[in-house]
Image (cartoon, rainbow, N blue to C red):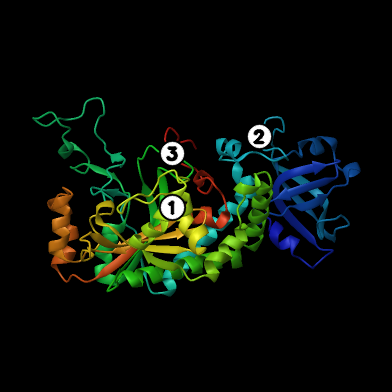
Amino acid sequence: MIKREKVKSLLETTEFDREVTVMGWVRTFRNNQFIAINDGSCMGNIQIVVDFNQTPEELLKRITTGAAIAIKGTVVESLGKGQKVDIKASSIEILGDSDAEKFPLQPKKHSLEFLREIAHLRFRTNTFNAVFKVRHALAFAIHQFYNERGFVYMHTPVITASDAEGAGEMFKVTTLDFDNPPRTDDGKVDFSEDFFARATNLTVSGQLEGELAAMAFGQIYTFGPTFRAENSNTTRHLAEFWMIEPEVAFADLEDNMQLAEDMMKYVITYALENCKDEIDFLNNRLLEEEKSKPQNERSELSLIDKLKFCLDNEFERLTYTEAIAILRSSKPNQKKQFKYLIDKWGADLQSEHERYLVEKHFKKPVILTDYPADIKSFYMRQNEPDAEGRKTVAAMDILFPGIGEMIGGSQREERMDKLTQRMDELNIPQDELWWYLDTRRFGTAPHAGFGLGFERLILFVTGMTNIRDVIAFPRFPKNAEF
């Protein structure tokens, strides 16, 4: 195997007049003399200078956009503008041809919609090189954050018989014959004949299993794929996405909020420090995009300003009840500019309300707590009714600029009687979750946790506006391409 040098290290080199081998894909080839190649190690290309008089014409014709090539040559100081280093080629080998007539990525700007249609090739563009380098860095930072704090990383099951969210929008997992499934006496599908001998689904959350582990290890986190069969064709929804879900024993809502704030600041700082080139590129890309928008639709903050906005401010903490009062008296609500008007306590907040609180009212990230029990999940700890007799739970949502809800979590209901009463109210069968209830039977303790949709975090840190552009091969209604 020939030892090759990466484009990234060559662009940073100060050692000239030495022989190197570099391999990559052709981005451009100008005047039969200058080849720009990229090997994925960074967004920058390195320029190869070819002596076309000494290079066979047949070989020159094969140096086309998208072709993979190997270059042997000498590192020299560049005479051109925009780069410090060139490689003066002594030999060129074509590793893989690319038909220039058919290769869909030409040296021009392509729309994101078009690139989604060729998601198998879009990694080769600067935009997606940057996005997925940032995705990698954020994933690493998540693991590093929890590892430094002594958390145990748990792999919770992808196939489950429980619906943690109670939403019912789950993908079924079965080996039964769709055309002729076994039936019970009353005509229903007989899942006792299925592989797992019961109805099973792809998971929507690892939380319930995470709680079991937290009751032994004290603090754990999950980081894995989750699935939701929600028929939503929006820029914010995927059928397959990744979730980070910590669970901490002996913790209350206050501890939960602090952990979430610390984590968000840690991973954003890590990305800024370790993906400077990528974030600078995405920041400039966003600034160019903003220029084409009407003045009133342009963002007040650049991407980098938005990231620093979250680092430089303590997150504002207030209750749902306080937020409703602010929203009801707000100008957009009074002037009927909100699509969903806030007219009463108990309303489920929409993205437009969450963004108003963050971007207009407080001008900092916001943590909302103590939501109405009726709009939250069964496992959230029930608060004492307020002065007006309204029932709330110890829930929290963290709201970010441009996104709205970034994190959702709660202190969990550790009291057996309260939990089973709530399950009965919502018709959640206790016998199906006997194992979950065992944590309340044997050594129950206060505990708390939250969920962070990883793709939403990447949307925020990259400034991308469609969630399908921050996951390699997006899954959504009517699409499972690649």
Residue 190, percent from left and from top:
15, 35
Q: Give the mark, 3 or 2, whose residue is nearer the N terminus.
A: 2
Residue 414: percent from left, percent from top: 20, 66
Cα distance between the residues tagged 3 and 2: 24 Å
**Which quarter of the picture shows residue 275?**
bottom right
Local crowd at mark 2 within 10 Å, few (<14), some, or many (≥20)? some
Separation (CA) of disc 2 from disc 1: 41 Å
In this view, the mark in front (3 or 1): 1
- Label 3: which residue? 476
Instruction: Answer few, some or many: residues within 10 Å of disc 3's Cα (few below 14, many 20 plus, some between 14 and 19).
Output: many
Residue tagged 2 = 104
**Which amino acid is tagged 3?**
Phe
Quarter occupied by the N terminus: bottom right
10 Å crowding of disc 1: few (<14), some (14-19), many (20+): many
Residue 230 % position (x, y): 36, 40
In front of the other: 327 or 81: 327
- Which of the numbered marks, if any, corresponds to residue 353? 1
